[in-house]
Image (spheres, rainbow, N blue to C red):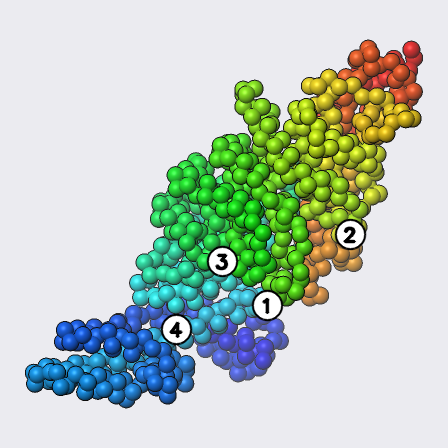
Amino acid sequence: MREACMAILYHTFGQCAENFQSTSLIHSHDALTSISDVPAKRNKVLDLLEVLQFRCPDTSTKYPQLLSSLGIESKIEEILRNSATFENGGVYYYSERGDRLIDLDAFREKLLQISQELNSQLTEPEKAGLKESVHHLLKWAWRYNKNLEEQAAQLHMLTGWSQIVEVAVSRRMSLFEDCSQLLFELLDASLNATTSPDCSVKMAYVLTNVSLTCMAKLRDERFICPAGTDSDAVTCLDIISSKQLPNAACNSLLFKLVMATLRNESSEILRRRQYALLLSYFQYCSSILDSDVPPSVLRFLLLEEQDGDDEDITLQKVLKEHNELAHANFSIIRKEAQAIVDLVTKDAFHGSEAGKALSFYVLDALISIDHEKYFLNQLQSRGILRSCLSDVANYLSKDSSLASESSQRFCTVDAQFSLLLRLSHHYGKHGSQILLSMGALQNLSACNLMGGQKKVNPRAISKIVKERTGEIDKRSLITPVLRIVTSFTSLVDSADFLEVKNKIVREIVDFAKQHQSVFNSILRENMTGTNLLTLEQLSMAVSILSKVWAYEENEECSYIQDLFSLMHSLFSVDFGILNFMQSPNMIENQKSELIAFGLCFSLVSYLYVLATRKNMRFQVSYGRNSDQQHPTLQMVSDLLNSATLALERVGEEKYMLLNKIRDLNELSRKEVDEIIKVCMKQDCISPNDNIRKRRYIAMIDLCCMAGNRDQLITLLLQITECAVTILLIHFQDDASAKGLSSFSDELLPVLERLEHLKEDKVGRSLKLFHRSITTLKEMTIRTITI
């Protein structure tokens, strides 16, 4: 069976991997003979596709003039529109292949019946003309059947061709020696065929499915461990030198894909596949580097690995090529921008729900490659963004049922949120200002976010729909709403005029008041055993309040006490011991720790605003009769101690991770598998994978963890600097400095540990950081000695 498979692939695609040709898999005389009879490197699949491309004759009906003048044309059309078979009073029958053809006898009977009804009213010349017209229609029906069978045969052959290609590509790519080149050739040929005037809509749909399979496989190939070496070792260069088509090949594919999408003959179902292909292409082009591996970690590792021979293979070169590809993609799309945006916009607002969702994701992708705010202007001039914002606001304001239609609408709204968020992410503050000027906060303030938290009777939805959409309640849309509002908080500090700043603050405060139940629910969530989504919502809610609530004089929502309560529970926590998610996945736990410290940073930033702009001074600790939780210097000191412990631990973890990456090629298979197991990536390998692929996967995971630790170090230093500044303000204030002697005794050891932080462990210059620590330490010692 394996021999037959190899022979078929070699005959069809003209190649197979050398290691498979030379192995015992092809040991039979017949298989070897059959392979040797075929000229190597001849791809018959592409030849077959060329053979299958021909234009079938037109099957449209052209009625004789007499039929129109006699008024029986409509009766004939009615007969042909009736899809019933001749057994049920119609004129059709189904062939063995399933094609619906005209039964000539039944059609003739219908035509004769119409003729007999008119005979008494016709002159002799008209009767002769009618008889001639009947013969003409019967000849047309015969040609219709013949042409339809040709079209069906063509479509069936193309479907068979596509199945051979898709099975080979998705299941047997390991048997080919030059996978990327083969996939490019198949993609190129399929797109060429799709743009041909001889290609029907149905054929274009089949060809687009082949293109989707090839593009998906190209994306898989993108991060597969590079082959072509006898060594078992992997290097950091393998991460950035992974397989990708040349920029010119990518540009060619995009141009042909654009032309295929803009073809004259089309349908929504075809365009949906083409949109999916376009999105897959953009994902392929954007995945130059793993987003979880920061360039700083790669640069550090490359500096150690690189020698004189590798000077031309650098991270800078890879990033430069990526930027060139991104600009080329933008230029290609821009040439047809008007037609593309018009087409996608039409599907976004007038297509089916599935078509709408994909269309909005395409608009999202166009924004992501925009370099000159060109597509932004295109969307604004058409009112797409304003309409999109209105749609999501209307959806959130209604109680939607848990039906299949509702689940599809939910997907569309999710895509619309993605577009709005892309605006603020890609264009930064300018994008946020555009959303704000469109009344985004007023629209979102009027929504009923809490109404979506009501649980729905599980019997009201089928199992299939539940599996597709999960728990379809609006609570999951709270996250993108909070992300949009969070982007507006960046405008608070950057506003040039006080009036503008006050207006932004007032609108965000009104939003928080309008959705008090949502904020209260998030702020009072039990963090033990929580998930990343809940942690992220909590972090964003606190981030929003920390930026604006210090300006709110009227405390009627009790947010301040909720914030203080969070400070009380979080500032003294050792996050290295506490596992919020209670998950065995180390990478997930690291992400949760990063979010948790981001939460602490928002909280201490709020205290910083109170201390600097509101001139609030905190007591050292809680009084005996204190009923409410207020911020204290002891809480700030606890956070400083917690951040110090984390800095020491995380710096050591990052150092050990980088060392493990350096020594990865010295580790045994068992040790490498342990790394993969800890990162829950067992599904990425099979028992047959060699040690090099295992080391490659382990290196990616270790780089991701080192990148997470690097991000956390940056955040911890920001927390520490903020806490130190708050303490300095109190020590410099004569009124507050009194009674700090015992507090200083506890603070001094923490400051001494911070003084001993090493730059090589944290990977940053600590000169200014140590200067602040030294200043606070001197004031602490002076307070103790007084």
- Point 56% across, 71% down: residue: 21
Total label count? 4
Which mark sits nearer the N-terminus, 3 or 2? 3
Q: Callout 4: helix, strand or loop? A: helix
- The answer to which of marks 3 and 4 sits earlier in the sequence is 4
Q: Quadrant of the C terminus?
A: top right
Residue of label 3: 354
Marks 3/4: CA–CA distance: 25 Å
Disc 1 to disc 3, how far (Cα)? 45 Å
Q: Regarding mark 2 in the picture, which secondary structure is present there?
A: loop
In the drawing, does residue 572 fall left or right of residue 331? right
- Which residue is painted at 78% across and 45% down in the image? 526
Point 45% across, 74% down: residue: 160
Query: Amino acid type of disc 3?
Result: Ala
Read off the residue under disc 4: 155
Above or below for 390 versus 460? above
The span from disc 1 to disc 2 (Cα, nearest Å) is: 42 Å
Nearest the camera: 500 or 602?
500
Label 4, label 1: how far apart the Cα atoms are: 36 Å
Q: Earlier in the sequence, mark 4 or mark 2?
A: 4
Give the residue number, with chain letter if any, for mark 2.
Answer: 583
Q: Nearer the viewer, residue 478 or 104?
A: 478
The image quadrant of residue 718 is top right
**Front residue of this view, candidates 775 and 324:** 775
